């Protein structure tokens, strides 16, 4: 603020401006209500909402997530949810489609550093997560997008202690099930949940599925995040003696197999179409399924749904291709590429461009992909 002849003129804030913590708090105006969460302070005032984060990085820590996103992890008092998203769930007259409306007061985002609070920009509330009517997660869009230099300043880059290796690639052809086991054990940690024995089906479980279910027993995510494989007790006979054992996420089709074969072929069964055979038998299909689901469930991502061919070639040259015929989901062009801690897939689109999705176990392994000149629409590196 600048005082001129007794009047106060507010100077617009710009990203990278440095404020004292007191000056940052005063942006909220009068009657400030404070709320602390792991990694950030949320201040609600008559003039604005002010969020001051620490320069930390973690999956459940509040603060800068990437150049466009700011995450808050709660739980939060009701006032925070109402200020950011309108009426909370379960309140009288609440409707997600029309009771959410923009809050007129701005949301100022800052990061607390030893030299002061660095101004990031304005946060636009985007996604929210509630538990029992209480806001416990919020994602805000940072406007304007942070420059790479400012991003590194407020969310300092770090290196992982360990990364999953690529030794599973060496045995893909000779032993797909060994490749599956090595990949899953390297990529997907065991959770604190025991799904028990996958049995109680009237059909014998083919060896590839038996291996897969043993791996999934303490890794529920292996059964699917985007698409799903059913446990044996949920298998159903479809037609021609084939068994339905998996489902596309929107119910568009089911995956089928012949239970009489030791490493059966896998078929896509879609209403109105003849069944289509997957290129790989069950042992290879399960590795492709695991690759896709691990990529979708990875905490750090990069994506673009309409990438031009020259960028796809640049990305492919920076990674190691998985040299099998394409996986048939979401269409018959899905190919995988990997690096240590990275899984990428490319899928051709009908308009001539390519959809690209990348998942990573640590954001540092995405950073080399950020130097390829690819115009990512989301990039967590």
Image (cartoon, rainbow, N blue to C red):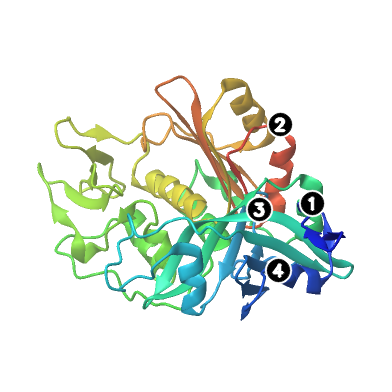
Q: Are marks 3 and 1 in contact (CB under 8 Å)?
A: no
Q: Which residue is mark 2?
A: 373
Q: Nearer the viewer, mark 1 or mark 2?
A: 1
Instruction: Give how far across and how far down residue 111 sits, in percent.
Output: 75, 64
Whole-number angstrom distance, CA of label 4 to CA of label 1 = 14 Å
Is residue 134 found left or right of 71 in the rendered image?
A: left
Mark 2 or mark 3: which comes first in sequence?
3
User: Residue 274: which quarter of the image?
Assistant: top left
Labels 4 and 2: the sequence-earlier one: 4
CA neighbours of label 2 inside 10 A, class few (<14), some (14 to 19), many (20+): few
Using the image, tell me which numbered label, if any, was put on residue 150: 1
| Distance of label 2 from label 3 (alpha carbons) | 17 Å
Q: Residue furthest front?
A: 5
Q: Nearer the viewer, mark 4 or mark 2?
A: 4
* 260 or 333: nearer the viewer: 333
Q: Residue at x 42, y 63 (%)?
A: 221
**Is disc 3 surrounded by few (<14), some (14 to 19) or many (20+) residues within 10 Å?**
many
Q: Which of label 2 and label 3 is nearer to you? A: 3
Q: Residue at x 12, y 47 (%)?
A: 238
x then y, percent, for residue 58: 65, 67
Q: Badge 1 local density, few (<14 within 10 Å), some, or many (20+)? A: some
Q: Which residue is mark 3?
A: 66
Residue at image mark 4: 53
- Of callouts 3 and 1, which one flags the residue occurring earlier in the amino acid sequence? 3
């Amino acid at each position: 603020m600048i005082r001129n002849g007794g009047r106060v003129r507010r100077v617009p804030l710009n990203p990278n401006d440095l404020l004292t913590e007191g000056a940052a708090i005063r942006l909220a105006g009068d009657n400030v209500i404070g709320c602390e969460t792991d990694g950030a302070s949320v201040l609600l005032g008559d003039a604005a909402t002010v969020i001051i984060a620490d320069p930390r990085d973690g999956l459940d820590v509040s603060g800068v997530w990437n150049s466009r996103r700011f995450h808050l992890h709660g739980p939060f008092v009701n006032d925070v949810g109402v200020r950011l998203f309108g009426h909370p769930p379960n309140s009288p007259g609440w409707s997600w489609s029309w009771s959410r409306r923009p809050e007129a007061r701005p949301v100022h985002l800052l990061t607390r550093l030893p030299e002061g609070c660095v101004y990031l920009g304005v946060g636009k509330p985007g996604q929210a997560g509630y538990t029992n009517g209480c806001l416990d997660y919020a994602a805000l869009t940072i406007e304007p997008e942070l420059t790479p230099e400012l991003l590194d300043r407020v969310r300092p880059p770090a290196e992982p202690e360990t990364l999953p290796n690529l030794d599973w690639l060496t045995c893909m052809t000779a032993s797909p099930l060994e490749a599956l086991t090595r990949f899953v054990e390297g990529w997907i940690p065991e959770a604190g949940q025991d799904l028990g024995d996958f049995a109680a089906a009237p059909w014998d479980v083919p060896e590839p599925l038996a291996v897969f279910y043993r791996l999934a027993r303490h890794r529920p995510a292996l059964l699917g995040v985007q698409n799903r494989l059913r446990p044996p007790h949920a298998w159903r006979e479809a037609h021609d003696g084939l068994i339905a054992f998996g489902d596309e996420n929107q119910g568009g089709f089911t995956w089928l197999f012949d239970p009489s074969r030791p490493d059966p072929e896998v078929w896509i069964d879609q209403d109105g179409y003849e069944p289509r055979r997957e290129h790989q038998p069950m042992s290879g299909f399960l590795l492709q399924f695991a690759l896709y689901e691990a990529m979708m469930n990875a905490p750090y991502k990069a994506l673009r749904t309409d990438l031009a061919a020259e960028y796809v070639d640049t990305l492919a040259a920076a990674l190691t291709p998985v040299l099998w015929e394409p996986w048939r989901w979401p269409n018959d062009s899905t190919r995988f590429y990997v690096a240590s801690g990275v899984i990428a897939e490319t899928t051709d689109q009908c308009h001539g461009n390519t959809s690209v999705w990348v998942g990573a176990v640590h954001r540092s392994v995405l950073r080399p992909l950020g130097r390829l000149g690819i115009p990512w629409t989301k990039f967590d590196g």
